[in-house]
């Protein structure tokens, strides 16, 4: 049913997973821009790309607003 341990340990695991997810998201955006630029494809031309950017921005704001 999840991670066993103290509350601070569980929070540490959660923070680590969130940080890893954030780094992977930034890496994914970087790779998409690099690929588009190499192939001569316009960046941010679709609703899908704008939703992805907004998701990363909102996730960043959520992390910044933590106590």
Image (cartoon, helix red, strand yellow):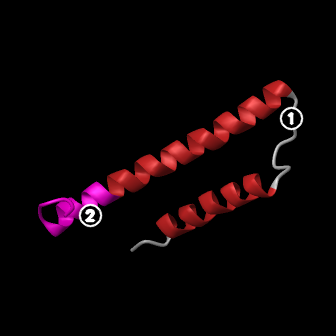
Say which label, 2 or 1, has the lower sequence index. 2
Pinpoint residue 32: horizontal percent, then vertical percent: 70, 37
Give the x, y percent position of residue 61: 56, 67
Q: Residue at x 68, y 62 (%)?
A: 54
Identify residue for label 1. 41
Quarter of image, res 47: bottom right
Q: Mark 2 against mark 1, which lies toward the viewer? A: 1
The quadrant where residue 26 appears:
top right
In the image: residue 14, left or right of residue 40: left
Query: Does residue 67 lie above or below 14 as drawn?
Result: below
Which residue is drawn at the image coordinates 74% and 52% (left, top)? 49
Mark 2 surroundings within 10 Å by alpha-carbon count, few (fewer than 14), some (14 through 19), many (20 or more): few
Q: What is the x, y in percent for residue 43?
A: 82, 43
Indicate yes or no whether the magenta region holds residue 26: no
Q: Quadrant of residue 35?
A: top right
Q: Is residue 25 left or right of residue 7?
A: right
> Which quadrant of the rendered structure holds the C terminus?
bottom left
Tell me, for residue 31, which label it has, or none. Answer: none
Say what secondary structure mark 2 lies in. Answer: helix
Q: Is residue 64 left or right of residue 39?
A: left
Please tell me whether residue 27 is drawn above or below residue 3 in the rendered image.
above
Residue at 65% over, 34% down: 31
Residue pointed to by mark 2: 11
Range drawn in magenta = 1-14
Residues marked 2 and 1 touching at CB (< 8 Å): no
As drawn, the residue found furthest toward the left would be 5
Classify mark 1: helix, strand or loop.
loop
Mark pair 2, 1: CA separation: 41 Å
């Amino acid at each position: 049913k999840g991670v066993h341990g103290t509350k601070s340990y569980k929070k540490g695991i959660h923070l680590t997973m969130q940080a890893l997810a954030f780094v992977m998201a930034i890496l994914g955006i970087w790779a998409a821009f690099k690929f588009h630029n190499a192939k001569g494809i316009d960046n941010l031309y679709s609703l899908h790309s704008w939703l992805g950017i907004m998701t990363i921005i909102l996730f960043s704001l959520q992390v910044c607003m933590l106590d």
